[in-house]
Image (cartoon, rainbow, N blue to C red):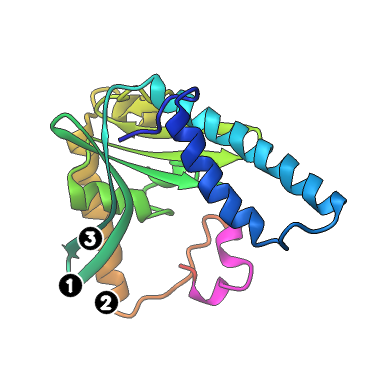
Amino acid sequence: QGLPARDDPALRAAFDAVAGEVLGALGGAGPGLLKRLRSLERERLWREVGRLADLDAGRPPFAVQAEQPLELRLGPLAFRLRIDRLERIGPDCVVIDYKTGTPPRMSRWVAERIQDCQLPLYAVGTGAAAIAVLEFRPERLAVRGMGNADFGLPGVKTAADATGEDGLDWPALRARWRTRLEQLAAELAAGDFRVNADDAADAAGQFAMLTR
């Protein structure tokens, strides 16, 4: 289920237990300055957890399933995956990926040649009714995604709104993703590892030689 309400003692107790263990590993009681820094960090983290609790409180009831295995075949390739977090909302399943770094752009999901495959792959494999990225960074909490409903998550758009294609529904977008992912899988299986130069940033950095 979602987080308890911000003013629920159970949330504060669970937070204090985890924060105490993590921050305590930074050096025991320590000098006065370190002790004060740990106290400040604890309160900062509590504010961040409170923002997540407020988000959950405004949503319909849901159940969380963590570390869910997924087996999927795309063309000649078989995948064995593990999804960090699935949410069950009534009969529907929603995949939400929590990111503490820079999140992927939705435009990369709907490009003619998919540039960020993770969540489209999960949507195809699970039949999810929506996919979303929850960007969770200091002083920033934002949700971006797409599906057949927003499920109480601001920032989740319909397939038509997300792609700018009038009349495109969510099942059609998932079917499109499957076709495009199968094409990528076929290319990989055939040994085609050419770098996709549509975005120069994809061909830079330490993993450039592995980037298509």
Q: CA distance from mark 3 to mark 2?
A: 23 Å
Q: Position of residue 122 (x, y in %)?
A: 27, 51
Query: Element under label 1?
Result: loop
Residue under the point 55% across and 42% down: 16
Q: CA distance from mark 1 to mark 3?
A: 20 Å
Q: Position of residue 46 (x, y in %)?
A: 60, 35
Task: State left or right for residue 107 relative to residue 199.
Answer: left
Q: Range of the magenta residues?
A: 200-210
The kind of residue tagged 1 is Pro
Q: Earlier in the sequence, mark 3 or mark 2?
A: 3
Q: Residue furthest front?
A: 29
Q: Is residue 79 above or below residue 12?
A: below
Label 2, residues with CA under 10 Å away: few <14, some 14-19, many ≥20 = few
Which residue position holds label 3?
69
Q: CA distance from mark 2 to mark 1?
A: 7 Å
Tell me the number on the disc at residue 76: 1
Question: Which image quarter is the N terminus in?
Answer: top left
Q: Earlier in the sequence, mark 1 or mark 3?
A: 3
Residue under the point 22% across and 43% down: 174
Which residue position holds label 2?
189
Question: Which image quarter is the C terminus in?
Answer: bottom left
